[in-house]
């Protein structure tokens, strides 16, 4: 017995117990992970048919809410891989900022959606706080400078205020060109608005979209997660932009704010509650200038009365005077 124990690296008493036993040891069968029922599998297959890119966490939440699935997410994930193999993606390098320092914003182009009695091209202005990852989404039918600035202000108000700086790409809504050394020339309207909001406007470097990778990730989530979630909601008969804004707000409250971010390892809603105290509220006069349907209200422009008369009276002069001046 001692020789066997030394050979196999076992305790001598263990070897003795196995030798004196009447037969091989039998272990109780382990409980199998909770499998999906036929109705749950049918729901998953149906949702994957409607939206193949739907996230596993969203499917897991639907099964818990609508089909009383009691298993863990790991159990569900293993079974989901059999239905849809997971795509392997390379990890991305991200830069972290302190609370209240940076907000990133960008447009998400979503395609044709019902709007009123017809189909219209919808775009979503997406803004995200760099530290807590709390997002805000507002919809529009164009991406003009006026609309972009108005939607951006509304998103900042939804987030609870403005951070120290605002990072965007070099969209024509925010930039009018670049200098010889490649630095962005910001649009004057954007510079004026940033001064009123008390933020420092910044534009990412050309061909470096991942400089604002946090909002790029949220744009992807809007396209993959929100649109998948939207496909399971009941739309009004004649939906408006306000209806889409409200649906996006519901998606953020019900889905996004409950997630635990893999980088910060914090629940988004809890981190947002801490960061909101460091944000600068949007001035009331700026919010008052926004129309109820999302279109910016026209700003009053004071023009000197004498300027209105310019061009009314034309003085005819001889060509000889022009030649003498040359």
Image (cartoon, rainbow, N blue to C red):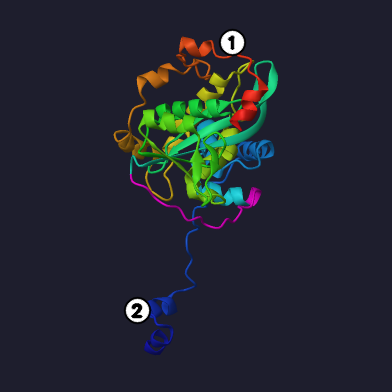
Residue 254 visible? The answer is no
Residue furthest bottom in the image: 3
Q: Is residue 237 left or right of residue 219?
A: right
Tell me if mark 2 has few (under 14), some (14-19) or many (20+) residues whose alpha carbon lies within 10 angstroms of its own: few
Q: Assign the N terminus to one quadrant of the image.
A: bottom left
Q: Residue at x 33, y 46 (%)?
A: 98
Q: Residue at x 35, y 42 (%)?
A: 101
- How many angstroms separate mark 1 from mark 2 (CA)? 117 Å
Q: Residue at x 50, y 44 (%)?
A: 184
The residue carrying mark 2 is 13
The residue carrying mark 1 is 313
Residue furthest left in the image: 277
Q: Report the front residue among 318 and 120.
A: 318
| Image location of residue 128, percent across then percent down | 45, 38
| Image location of residue 228, percent across then percent down | 60, 35
Q: Report the front residue among 27 and 175.
A: 175
Chain part drawn in magenta = 82-98
What secondary structure predominates along the stretch shown in magenta? loop
Q: Are marks 1 and 2 in contact (CB under 8 Å)?
A: no
Q: Is residue 282 left or right of residue 72?
A: left
Q: Earlier in the sequence, mark 1 or mark 2?
A: 2
- Look at the image and say whether residue 140 sits in the magenta stretch: no
Label 1 secondary element? loop
| 31 is higher (above) or lower (below) than 54 | below
| Image location of residue 104, percent across then percent down | 46, 40
Label 2 secondary element? helix
């Amino acid at each position: 017995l001692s020789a066997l124990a030394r050979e196999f690296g076992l305790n001598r008493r263990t070897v003795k117990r196995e030798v004196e036993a009447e037969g091989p040891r039998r272990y109780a069968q382990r409980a199998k992970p909770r499998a999906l029922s036929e109705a749950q599998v049918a729901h998953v297959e149906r949702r994957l048919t409607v939206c193949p890119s739907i996230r596993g966490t969203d499917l897991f939440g639907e099964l818990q809410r609508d089909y009383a699935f009691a298993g863990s997410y790991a159990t569900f994930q293993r079974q989901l891989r059999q239905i849809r193999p997971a795509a392997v993606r390379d990890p991305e390098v991200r830069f972290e900022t302190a609370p209240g320092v940076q907000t990133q914003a960008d447009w998400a182009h979503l395609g044709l959606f019902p709007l009123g009695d017809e189909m219209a091209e919808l775009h979503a202005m997406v803004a995200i706080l760099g530290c807590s990852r709390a997002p805000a989404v507002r919809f529009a039918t164009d991406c003009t400078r006026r609309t972009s600035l108005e939607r951006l202000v509304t998103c900042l108000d939804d987030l609870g205020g403005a951070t120290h700086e605002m990072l965007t790409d070099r969209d024509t809504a925010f930039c009018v060109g670049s200098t010889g050394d490649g630095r962005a020339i910001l649009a004057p309207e954007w510079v004026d608005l940033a001064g009123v909001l008390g933020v420092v406007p910044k534009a990412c470097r050309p061909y470096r979209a991942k400089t604002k990778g946090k909002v790029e990730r949220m744009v992807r989530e809007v396209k993959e997660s929100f649109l998948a979630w939207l496909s399971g909601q009941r739309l009004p008969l004649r939906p408006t932009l306000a209806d889409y804004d409200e649906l996006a707000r519901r998606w953020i409250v019900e889905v996004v704010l409950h997630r635990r971010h893999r980088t910060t390892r914090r629940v988004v809603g809890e981190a947002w509650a801490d960061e909101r105290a460091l944000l600068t509220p949007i001035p009331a006069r700026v919010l008052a200038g926004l129309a109820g349907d999302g279109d910016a209200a026209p700003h009053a422009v004071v023009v000197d009365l004498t300027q209105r008369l310019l061009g009314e009276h034309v003085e005819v002069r001889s060509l000889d005077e022009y030649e003498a001046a040359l």
